[in-house]
């Protein structure tokens, strides 16, 4: 059977897949080009083997790395060097936070996402062709002034920082650098040669190329959140790693450890809730509805690291391991491909796996009176992308929703169904969004949440049913008119990142803004069109994350602090600090103009030099003579990046679009010379 064709649906420049059944390779698929690839040498989408020895190129496996660091900890547990339910401080005594509850965080809580940590400290995590170790070396400092969003152990919510702490735990307990542990201990036990981190893989082996902005090739990304997302490997090695979780395989772990990792985080609770996370130890999910119905245990973990994306799926009892890695695309597409490969093997064995489908819905002409108590304002969150506001009311048999966000406003209508859920309908009362329903639940703490059931349809690649909490009831937050006026003064201002390294991938989308929420008093949106959060105003210069939604809807939340008259690179700026994300942004409209008489820019570490392009240089070009450890980024008036020296061959003429922006980033003591 030609399993290779299944990979063609991945929208990516490079796609690598490996399928192992037992110890046998069904079909090597290293570096099959996707038909929709953007690379110019795709040979019209035909198959093309690019590595003669079949080992394949190196990819960052992103958050699949979490399974690696979890396995490393479990190996040390089996050596009786770590106790899972001991506090983290037993192994890292200097770990401290601005919240005494941190003392209750255990090793297990880091592994099953129940630590209560805010989420992700992003400072200097994604670096192009740069193996600087700031993020690793300063993680404890980054966490030291953070609070917790929940009591440790309260609920599972996806958390990157917890796995970077596990990286440090492995180092402290083993006495080895984490990179060495992955390569020299785990890699040797698995008999693989192409698994490590950016420190020993990039440059040593050929990395999958990165193409952005069409066919423009970029430098190689180095993911420095090593425990959370920094393992690098070929698809073959990644699939081989999956085999260590086969039943009766003792390459890395005994049965007890593997079963422990494959157990849902709240499996022992009497009130197990299908709407909370399905995570085990390290795995995204240890239960998948369609496989559970077919009697097949499946473990899955996806990963996204800016340009590289990954999915690892393992059926331990069936002894099947599937890895799909890509440069471009996203992990959801990789996951659909991996499941398609798994389903094909299972079908060959006589096991039919049926995709979930939308069931029949019978709408009611009326809504029970008790639902009136659920009228009001809700924050809607689906993870780290966008927080919107729903104003819900019940009128003449309909649930009306006025949705407002940072960039949109929309009116939605829902009808009540006989199964006690609400279905979205159009103006003609036809249901829309097949398989998507919402319902309400009041928790014992008094909070009211919105639950959502969704049928995710991947055209040509199957369906996936998902259930999750997505909404939380919120009330007006009474603050003075002067405080609201101060926040409103920041509306329509562009704030731009300034405190990351010259190689940071966050300079590709560096802009943030603020918008005071309408209708709901005392809240403000902060973020960009791609990702924004609703924050609760605490004062004229602070706004707090407030989500308590159980599950991943509360992931990667952060507090916001405003500071005025801050000196950055010899300029005075208003600054937004996205606390716990490790990102600081200045009001770029307060930056000076880049004029024709400026012929050099002095660089300062962690203080990027921003300029507006509204003067006599607009619509011209410049050339730069810059140090190796520096970068230049250019943006148009909409904040879209149009140029960076991180592009391969990106040191030629640099365009200066009218009303755009340019930033120079580098190390203290260095200078960029500007020529025309």
Image: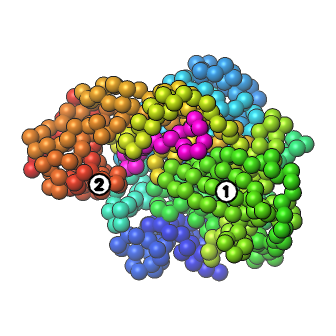
Q: Kindly identify the residue that appears in the image at 86 percent across and 54 percent down.
A: 369
Label 2 to label 1: alpha-carbon separation: 36 Å
Residue placed most toward the observer, 448 or 332: 448
Q: What residue is pinned by disc 1?
A: 401
Horizontal arrangement in the rendering, residue 336 relative to residue 619 (left or right): right
- Disc 2 secondary structure class: loop
Q: Which residues are magenta?
A: 505-524
Q: Find residue 612 and report its image quarter.
A: top left
Up-down relation of residue 282 to residue 91 (above or below) = below
Horizontal arrangement in the rendering, residue 635 relative to residue 43 (left or right): left
Horizontal arrangement in the rendering, residue 258 relative to residue 457 (left or right): right
Residue placed most toward the observer, 200 or 31: 31
Up-down relation of residue 71 to residue 148 (above or below) = below
Residue 166, horizontal then vertical, whole percent: 62, 34
Q: What residue is pinned by disc 2?
A: 636
Residue 169, horizontal then vertical, whole percent: 61, 30
């Amino acid at each position: 059977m030609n399993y290779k064709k299944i990979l063609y649906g991945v929208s990516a420049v490079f796609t690598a897949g490996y399928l192992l059944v037992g110890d046998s390779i069904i079909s090597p698929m290293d570096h099959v080009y996707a038909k929709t690839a953007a690379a110019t040498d795709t040979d019209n989408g035909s198959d093309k083997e690019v590595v003669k020895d079949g080992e394949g190129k190196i990819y960052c496996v992103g958050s699949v790395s979490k399974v690696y660091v979890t396995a490393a900890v479990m190996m040390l547990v089996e050596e009786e060097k770590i106790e899972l339910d001991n506090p983290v401080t037993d192994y890292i005594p200097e770990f401290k936070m601005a919240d005494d509850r941190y003392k209750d965080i255990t090793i297990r809580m880091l592994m099953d996402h129940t630590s209560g940590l805010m989420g992700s400290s992003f400072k200097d995590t994604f670096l192009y062709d740069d193996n600087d170790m700031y993020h690793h070396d300063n993680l404890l400092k980054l966490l030291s002034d953070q609070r917790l969003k929940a009591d440790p152990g309260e609920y599972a919510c996806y958390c990157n920082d917890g796995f970077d702490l596990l990286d440090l735990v492995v180092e402290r307990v083993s006495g080895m650098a984490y990179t060495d542990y992955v390569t020299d201990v785990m890699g040797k036990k698995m008999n693989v040669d192409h698994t490590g981190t950016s420190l020993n893989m990039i440059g040593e082996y050929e990395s999958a190329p990165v193409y952005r902005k069409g066919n423009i090739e970029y430098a190689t990304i180095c993911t420095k959140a090593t425990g959370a997302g920094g393992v690098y490997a070929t698809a073959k090695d990644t699939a081989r790693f999956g085999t260590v979780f086969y039943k009766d395989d003792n390459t890395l772990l005994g049965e007890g450890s593997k079963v422990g990792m494959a157990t849902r985080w709240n499996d022992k609770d009497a009130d197990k809730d299908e709407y909370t996370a399905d995570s085990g130890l390290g795995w995204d999910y240890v239960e998948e509805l369609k496989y559970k119905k077919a009697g097949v245990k499946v473990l899955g973990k996806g990963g996204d690291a800016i340009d590289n994306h990954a999915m690892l799926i393992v059926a331990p009892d069936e002894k099947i391991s599937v890895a799909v890695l890509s440069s471009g695309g996203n992990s959801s597409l990789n996951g659909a491909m991996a499941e398609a490969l798994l389903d094909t093997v299972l079908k060959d064995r006589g096991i039919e796996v049926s995709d979930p489908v939308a069931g029949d819905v019978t709408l009611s002409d009326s809504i029970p009176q008790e639902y009136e108590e659920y009228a009001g304002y809700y924050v809607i969150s689906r993870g780290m992308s966008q927080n919107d506001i729903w104003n819900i009311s019940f009128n003449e048999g309909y649930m009306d929703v006025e949705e407002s966000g940072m960039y949109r406003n929309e009116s939605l209508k829902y009808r009540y169904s006989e199964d006690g859920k609400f279905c979205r309908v159009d103006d003609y009362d036809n249901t829309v969004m097949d398989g998507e329903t919402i319902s309400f639940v009041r928790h014992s703490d008094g909070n009211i949440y919105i639950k959502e059931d969704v049928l995710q349809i991947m055209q040509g690649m199957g369906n996936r049913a998902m259930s999750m909490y997505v909404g939380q009831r919120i009330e007006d937050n009474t603050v003075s008119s002067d405080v609201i006026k101060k926040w409103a003064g920041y509306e329509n201002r562009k704030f731009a990142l300034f405190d990351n390294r010259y190689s940071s991938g966050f300079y590709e989308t560096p802009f943030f803004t603020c918008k005071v929420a309408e209708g709901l008093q005392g809240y403000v949106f902060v973020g960009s069109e791609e990702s924004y959060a609703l924050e609760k105003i605490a004062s004229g210069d602070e706004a707090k994350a407030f989500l308590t939604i159980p599950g991943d809807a509360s992931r990667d939340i952060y507090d916001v602090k405003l500071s005025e008259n801050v000196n950055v690179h010899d300029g005075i700026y208003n600054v937004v600090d996205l606390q716990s994300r490790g990102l600081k942004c200045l009001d770029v409209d307060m930056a000076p103009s880049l004029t024709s008489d400026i012929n050099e820019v002095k660089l300062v570490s962690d203080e990027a030099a921003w300029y507006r392009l509204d003067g006599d240089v607009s619509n011209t070009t410049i050339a730069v003579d810059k140090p190796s450890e520096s970068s230049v980024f250019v943006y148009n008036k909409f904040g879209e990046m149009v140029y960076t020296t991180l592009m391969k061959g990106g040191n030629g003429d640099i365009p200066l679009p009218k009303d755009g922006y340019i930033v120079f980033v580098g190390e203290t003591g260095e200078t960029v010379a500007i020529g025309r």
